[in-house]
Image (cartoon, rainbow, N blue to C red):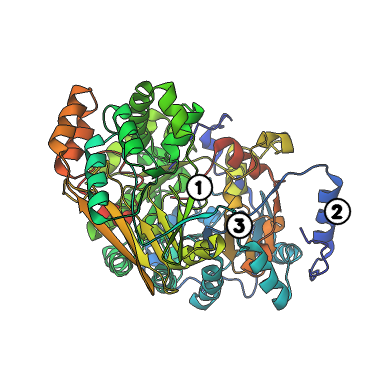
Amino acid sequence: MLDLPCPRRELPNLDGRAQFWANSPDIPFVRGVSMSHRIPEDQSVRLDRALLREHREKLQAHRGKATWGEKLVPLREFKEAAQGYGRALEPKHREQEVSRFLDARNDGIPHEGPFSKIVAFGGIYNNSYGLEAVLEQASASGAEATYCLGDFGGFGPHPEKVWPLLVQGGVRCIQGNYEESLSSGRDDCNCGYSDPRDNHFATISYGYTAENCSPEFRAWMGTHPKRRRVLVGDRRVLLVHGSPRQVNEFLFASTSPTAFLEVLLDQEQCDAILCTHTGLHWHRKLPSGRDVVNVGVIGRPANDGNTHVWYAEITDRGSELGVQLKPLSYDFQALAQDMRAAGLPEEFVETVLTGWWTTCLEILPARERASSRF
Amino acid sequence: MAGSAENVVETGNAAGRAATGRAAARQAVPRVELRSLDTLWFQVAGTLCNLACNHCFISCSPTNHTHEYLSLEEVQRYLDEAVQLGVKEYYFTGGEPFLNPDMEAILEATLKLGPATVLTNGLLLDPERCARLAAIAQASEYSFDLRISIDGYDAEGNDPIRGPGTFDRILEGAQNAQRAGVNPVLTVTEVREENGSRRGREKFMALLRELGIERPRLKILPVFHLGAEAQRSGAYEAWQKLADQDAAGEGWDHLQCSSCRMVTDQGVWVCPILVNEPEGRMGQTLADTLDSFPLEHPACWTCHVHGVSCRT
């Protein structure tokens, strides 16, 4: 839902609006194209009698005619012209065309590992308390490597506090849209929101984070790769921020069809994809036996009325990948206190304290929004 | 468009060949590549509608048979192909989709495969239909959205565009959807400059809240100077064309046609806007339409300049 500019052209007076329809010649009825056998005489059509009485000419203007751009032409003329455009490939060429289109993309990135267990998390959002907690869990779990899928900043207070924790924790990072934007000096977060209500709060988050990041921290953000490849056992795992295609693509469970994900995995030549960006964790085992995991975020609760946040533990289970999405408790009261002291919006603080999102809700698909409090 | 590659079966007639010749004579028409087929549209009600709005860029009406209904079987054939190509989301439009007796069965079949949106004028959204739609949506793991068109925040603004008495009936449909648990997106075109302005948006939001819609959703679209709208507000002018340099080195990935196609009863078109332009037709199956498309039409200029996204 874009915030679109107004049309540049001045619109003429609407009083002349019926002229085109009124001036249309009375077009004779053409056999085979009457509406009567196409639109059933059900209640809906009866309802429209009132409309029909009032602007009969307009409703009947197209008998036997097709609209070709702004002209009315005989139906057959349009249909014949249309069939003259486009291709009709032979069946075997169609197959070739599809495989050309879906060709695998080789990014040439070498695999890290192999590991038997890794921890992956996304969206720190300046929550140093959450970051401390997840690093403790990772070390207690015996994970051999810890990955952050990007978005160190946004939403929370004091961006610089997470930097030493990431360095000391040996966290292997990739850039999210925040790191891309901050390291390149972009003036917005490039979150990918389209509703003005979402963008209002996204601008506050980004503005605060940008103001409170040193040039050195920003430069460090830009040193991380945009994607990584990891072996867990013999499984090839691709790590990205939004999706393999785009840093700010939202992969929500209810808008990511299984067939679409299978195609992504084929193209990327991997057995699993780990992503974040949406703020909501989910895991799907695909019919092919492969996995897609949105690891969630540790910077903001998952809009379910609970104050904890989420991360993922990925283990080698021989024949398959073990995927565990894990809730993480942290000192959310301390975070809320720091946010208030930093002058961040009370809406953000409320989310931390209640577990319900109060901002950036319009991006949620219908299914995810239905279980949301606001 | 009717390409010269050897694997192409030429189906061109005189009109098509003449137009192709004209296209070749022009210089440097920019072309948009299909980077992935994310969004698949269905002209499920053809150009048949129970309204005949003054701004309809494809002049839909009860007698406009430029495109006919799609049956469940026809849709299913394209869905099978779409699954292979990794389509991410499905949209249904017309005309008025709910005139098509197969629409609910089509929606049910689609929601087994991915998220779906239906674009409707709201007139056929009686409580029973809304309850059935809610049940279909509930049974799917994917999201379902209903987009209801309205063109004014009051009858004085809307009815001259969409037809006498439509304002109240659209709102009744929206309320029925809301009561059944389907939160609709109101789609508004900029038939009046005010509709897309801050003040206009606020008025639409207030209207929705008055109806008891607590989470109002609004999508604003520019007008396309085609079909009935060309008669209402004027056709495109010669200068409204894209040239290579308009992309400013960034390519055309921001355009919908870099990730969508549109299915009608006569084949596959490049996008939802150009279905009444024969040169918008790209082939018979989706596989025929995976190559690039020339951005020659002035409507392409609207999409570029206004940053149009047809998606919800």
Q: Determine which residue is flagged by label 2.
A: B21
Horizontal side of A341 relative to A251 (left or right) equals left
**In the rendered view, would you say A279 is above or below A181?**
below
Q: Position of residue A29 (x, y in %)?
A: 63, 68
Cα–Cα span, label 1 and label 2: 38 Å
**In the rendered view, would you say A119 is above or below A5?**
below
Which numbered disc flags the more N-terminal residue, 1 or 3?
3
- Viewer-nearest of discs 1 and 3: 3
Mark 1: which amino acid?
Answer: Gln
List the single residue furthest toward the left.
A333
> Share a chain, discs 1 and 2?
no
| Residue A3 in sight from this viewpoint | no
Horizontal side of A182 relative to A109 (left or right) equals left
Instruction: Give the camera-side residue of B145 and B52.
Output: B145
Q: Secondary structure at mark 3?
A: loop
Mark 2: which amino acid?
Answer: Gly
Horizontal side of B51 relative to B13 (left or right) equals left
Mark 3: which amino acid?
Answer: Asn
Q: Determine which residue is flagged by label 3.
A: A106
Q: Position of residue A234 (x, y in %)?
A: 45, 67
Residue drawn at (85%, 56%) of the image? B18
> Share a chain, discs 1 and 3?
yes
Cα–Cα span, label 1 and label 3: 16 Å
Q: Determine which residue is flagged by label 1.
A: A246
* Residue A257 sits in quarter: bottom left
Instruction: Give the camera-side residue of B199 and A343.
Output: A343
Chain letter of disc 2 in the image? B
Q: Residues within 10 Å of mark 2 (few under 14, many from 20)?
A: few
